[in-house]
Amino acid sequence: MRQPCTVVISLALAITACSDAAPRVDPEKPVVDGQPMTQIEYLGRFCRDKQADPMCVEVAQAMNRASTTAEVPKGW
């Protein structure tokens, strides 16, 4: 007979593995499982086959906004 704890852990892993959505993060500064990452790292890791995922779209838009706002060096 299986231990109840083993069944619960197996079920939790199965549910996690079936998740198709990208993890919810702050689009400006993604942090997944306590690990900060760049927007490009997030997109490469979680959005490779999910370009239409709402979270992937938000992170990509935030990255595009950041790339268009460059600081102008003093004296230019």
Image (cartoon, helix red, strand yellow):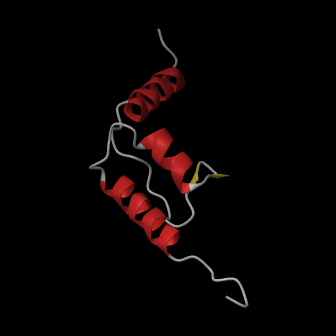
The spot of residue 37 in percent (x, y) is: 62, 52
Q: Is residue 5 above or below residue 61?
A: above
Nearer-the-camera pick, 51 or 17: 51
Image quarter hosting the C terminus: bottom right
Residue at far bottom of view: 75
Residue shown at 47% from the left, 8% from the top: 1
Q: Is residue 52 above or below residue 71?
A: above
Among the 4 quarters of the image, the one containing residue 62: bottom left
Residue at far front of view: 76
Nearer-the-camera pick, 58 or 1: 58
Q: How many marks?
A: 0
Residue shown at 44% from the left, 49% from the top: 23
The spot of residue 4 in percent (x, y) is: 49, 23
Residue shown at 51% from the left, 70% from the top: 66
The spot of residue 72 in percent (x, y) is: 63, 83
The spot of residue 67 in percent (x, y) is: 51, 67
Residue at far right of view: 74
Residue shown at 52% from the left, 21% from the top: 6
Residue at far left of view: 52
Q: Is residue 68 above or below residue 5?
A: below
